[in-house]
Image (tube, helix red, strand yellow):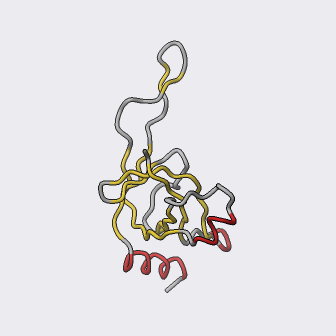
């Protein structure tokens, strides 16, 4: 079993189902481009949610808020790459994606790490 499969198996075992919400492309209303009012496209994902350590919050000097969470997204079966224009729905909670990084040694993505924040 490869490292990508091991990461996906661990995220699936200890994580939960979630939905990546990708907004539709902006539309031209004749005066310029505006956000598309239609609902975003949902993509099912498997995630493992965690909190940041207090020490990291101090080091980050404001880049990480106290309520921010780390979310690990399995790359196996994922049909889109998470982006900061997307949102993430875990249960009934919708979260903004602040930062996306990937663990991809040798060019193969094992999983994505997201910094997410309440959408309020």
Left or right of 37 on screen, residue 70: right
Q: Residue furthest bottom?
A: 1
Q: Nearer the viewer, residue 103 or 76?
A: 103
Task: Where is residue 85? Give x, y as percent.
Answer: 52, 44
Q: Quadrant of the C terminus?
A: top left
Where 63 falls versus 1 (above or below)? above
Task: Where is residue 84? Give x, y as percent.
Answer: 55, 48
Where 100 falls versus 105 (above or below)? above
Residue in view at x 36 percent, y 49 percent: 42
Task: Where is residue 110? Give x, y as percent.
Answer: 55, 72
Q: Nearer the viewer, residue 9 or 64?
A: 64
Residue in view at x 34 percent, y 38 percent: 39
Residue in view at x 42 percent, y 67 percent: 47
Task: Where is residue 83? Give x, y as percent.
Answer: 54, 51
Q: Nearer the viewer, residue 96 or 84?
A: 96
Q: Residue furthest top?
A: 30
């Amino acid at each position: 079993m490869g490292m990508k499969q091991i990461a996906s198996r661990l995220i699936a075992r200890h994580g939960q189902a979630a939905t990546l919400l990708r907004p539709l492309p902006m539309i031209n209303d004749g005066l310029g481009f505006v956000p598309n009012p239609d609902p975003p496209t949902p993509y099912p994902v498997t995630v493992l949610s965690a909190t940041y350590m207090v020490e990291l919050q101090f080091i980050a000097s404001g880049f990480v808020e106290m309520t921010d969470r780390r979310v690990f997204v399995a790359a196996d079966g994922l049909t889109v790459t998470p982006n900061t224009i997307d949102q993430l729905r875990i249960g009934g909670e919708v979260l903004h994606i602040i930062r996306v990084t990937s663990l991809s040694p040798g060019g193969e993505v094992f999983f994505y790490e997201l910094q997410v924040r309440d959408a309020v």
